[in-house]
Image: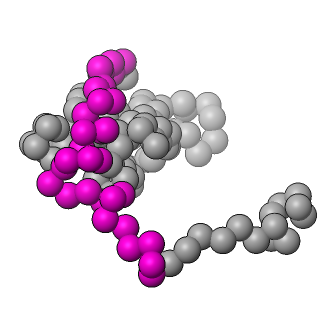
Amino acid sequence: MTLLCVPYWTDTKNAYLRVRRCAQARAIENECYVAISGSVGNLPKVENMDIQYSQSAIFTPSDFAFPHDAIAAEATPNTEMTLMVDLDLDLLKELRQKGSVRNLKSRRRELYEVLWKPDLAPDGG
């Protein structure tokens, strides 16, 4: 995975911060970019949509080739705006091969395995 997109809807800043911190962790753990985007403002005639809080952002892995705070860009909090960012996918390749921490390369495959159980698949097969 190179880019994980996380759409969300939150009504308070603390709910938004929960989404943000989890997204930042995914960028670091999975050595990928993570883009978060939610709704801002209000929809007064729509039930349960009267208040919204958001701040769109793009997070990066945390290593030397990336921004020191692992944030590629972020919008103004709770403001409707477009966020555009150029992401260098080659930096992810380099990180995965030569980074100071290589999560994907350091997996201990002898400790676990992933098995597909077809009988548990939603379609039965």
State whether residue 91 is above or below residue 26. above
Residue drawn where x is 47% and y is 38% of the image: 5
Q: Position of residue 51 (x, y in %)?
A: 45, 40
Q: Residue 4: horizontal and vertical position, in percent?
A: 45, 41
Residue 45, compared with residue 13, is above or below; it is above
Q: Residue 107 or 22: which is nearer the viewer?
A: 107
- Residue 43: horizontal and vertical position, in percent? 54, 30
Q: Quarter-wise, where is residue 59 in the image?
A: top left
In the displayed structure, does residue 82 sit left or right of residue 46? Answer: left
The residue positioned 55% from the left and 40% from the top of the image is 49
Q: Is residue 108 magenta?
A: yes
Answer yes or no: is residue 10 visible: yes
Residue 77 falls in image quadrant: top left
In-front residue for pair 55/61: 61
What's drawn in magenta, residue-wise?
A: 82-111
Q: Residue furthest bottom?
A: 111
Residue 38: x and y, percent? Answer: 44, 36
Regarding residue 54, the answer to whether it shows in the image is no
Give the answer, above or below, for where 118 lies relative to 45: below
Instruction: Give left or right: position of 113 versus 62.
Output: right
Question: Is 63 on the left-hand or right-hand side of 33?
Answer: left
64 part of magenta stretch: no
